Amino acid sequence: MKNSKVFKGLNYFFSLMGFLFVAGILFVFLTNIGGLGTFLSVLGLMKTHGLAEINSGQIIQGATAGIVDSLDDPYSKYLDARTWKDLRERLEAKFGGIGVYVLQDSEGRLKIVSPIKGTPAYKEGVKHGDIIIRINGKSTMNLDDDDAVHLMRGDPGTQLILGVYRESDGSEHDFRIVREIINVPSVEAELIDGVPEIGYIKLSQFHSRSAQEMSESLNQFMEKDHIKGLIIDLRNNGGGDFDVSIAIASIFLSGKDVVSAVDRQGNKTVHQASGGKIDIPVILLVNGDSASASEILAGALKDNKRALLVGEKTYGKGLVQTVFALSDGSALKLTTQKYFTPDGTDINEVGINPDYVVKNDPNSDKDLQLEKAVEIMKTKL
């Protein structure tokens, strides 16, 4: 009897869902008759007059991608199965490739945020700021960063020809790079030369192991080196996992607001820090390519008066994307929330201004921003 009621309830549920689905389709048809007619006309002309054979799977996939693109949101994307696999590998930080982070700038150009130290791209001389113009002879025009990342991935031992434009010398450069398995550590830790009381951590991205790597490096600093101050370098860090940024902020904050996120309906979620084991002075280095999760961390530590920021204004990406896995192996990466710093600041397309504005000369190896951070930290020891 109990099972019968369960099955009856499920039957009602799925019947209702089916009704709502059909009603939704009818609503779209009735309110967009002109557009639907155009769509069917184009499809008919392609079938009857087009030289190329129609591939129904490609048409459906293209239409799906077009729906998402119509949002005019550069961060919302339909990810086919291959691209979704690439993204998962990137977040898990192990894949076959050349070892670069890529960010699509406001002009739609694909810019090398930073080559990862020790990787094939780094060894061949690819530099931060290089604009990718060709991948294996194929123009990158109209490619987004996900498409570019996929083209640069491949089996270890295979060769990639990367064409870039370098603004510093106004020239194009071609690099022949042999792919390797890229095991991507997100943290590089060392002591500041001549000032062993100051620890320096370069955080290059926010992936699945970043919070653990950060904790391990800090434990080493605190227990073995007995540092009294810490500089965290977020320059050229294009972001990554939203939850990881909160986990890293929790190392320095305890019970404080890290970030709040608001959805389309106005529902607000406040994310708070837990832990807060490290209480030494902290300075963050930031620049125009510090984006997304980097800005969450920077905004949280700045607003809570937990860290000073040195460098240049950050990128200004204050939107949260959620990835919805689909049944055919593809996925939808959709902007679902806007986030605000603990003080309630909307940084999207605005960025975060540092406490100390310092610019580096792109033609010099001298790191004026790091030097300023060390100078300030010395006064706090």
Image: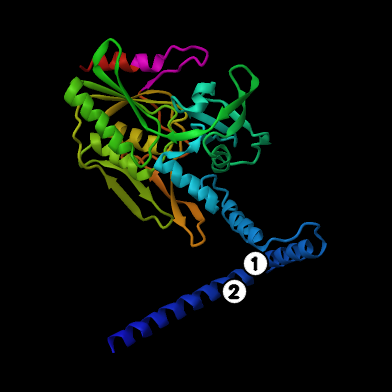
Query: Can residue 83 be seen?
Result: yes
Residue at image location 81% in from the left, 65% down from the top: 48
- Label 2 belongs to which residue? 26
Marking on residue 32 = 1
Q: Is residue 175 left or right of residue 226?
A: right
Q: Looking at the picture, how far across and down is residue 288, in whole percent?
A: 47, 28
The C terminus, quarter of image? top left
Q: Residue furthest front?
A: 157
Residue at image location 18% in from the left, 22% down from the top: 224
Placement of 198 over or under 13, stated as above or below: above
Residue stretch in magenta: 356-372
Type of amino acid at the residue the image marks with label 1:
Asn
Res 33 quadrant in image = bottom right
- SS of the residue under disc 2: helix
Sequence-wise, the earlier of marks 2 and 1 is 2
CA separation, marks 2 and 1? 10 Å
Reply yes or no: does residue 369 show up in magenta: yes
